[in-house]
Amino acid sequence: MKRLCEVLDVNRSSYHKWLVGAEVRAVRQHQDRGPAREIRQVHGESGGAYGSPRATAGLRE
């Protein structure tokens, strides 16, 4: 591990912090899938024309 961190120029403590947070990131990604799907749907229905203000309004409907 030490050599890998040296090659990548990453502190070992940073790597371990990232590793510990993997489960939290996985949960967050799972939670984000639903809203992301809805955003893609609203954007697609507009033919890709809606920007964030209109997409937000479409999601609120």
Image (cartoon, rainbow, N blue to C red):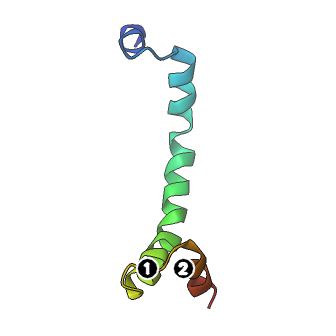
SS at badge 1: helix
- Which quadrant holds the N terminus? top left
Q: Look at mark 1 in the image and give the residue it sits on.
A: 43
Looking at the rendered structure, the kind of residue marked 1 is His
Looking at the image, residue 40 sits to the left or right of residue 31; the answer is: left
Image quadrant assignment for residue 60: bottom right
Q: Look at mark 2 in the image and give the residue it sits on.
A: 55
Q: Which residue lies at the image location 50% right of the left edge and 31% below the top edge?
A: 19
Question: Measured from the top left, where is residue 7 in percent x and y?
Answer: 35, 11
Q: Which residue lies at the image location 51% right of the left edge and 15% below the top edge?
A: 12
Please report whichever mark, 1 or 2, sits nearer to the chain's N-terminal start: 1
Nearer to me, 2 or 8: 8
Looking at the rendered structure, the kind of residue marked 2 is Ala
- Which quadrant holds the C terminus? bottom right
How many numbered callouts?
Answer: 2
Badge 1 vs badge 2, beta-carbon distance below 8 Å? yes
Q: Is residue 39 above or below residue 29?
A: below
Q: Is residue 8 above or below residue 41?
A: above
Question: Measured from the top left, where is residue 44 in percent x and y?
Answer: 38, 82
Q: Is residue 20 above or below residue 13?
A: below
Question: Measured from the top left, where is residue 43 in percent x and y?
Answer: 43, 79
- Which of the labelled discs sits on residue 18, or is there none? none
Q: Which residue lies at the image location 57% right of the left edge and 81% below the top edge?
A: 54
Question: Measured from the top left, where is residue 27 in percent x and y?
Answer: 54, 55
Image quadrant assignment for residue 52: bottom right
How many residues crowd mark 2 within 10 Å: few (<14), some (14–19), many (20+)? some
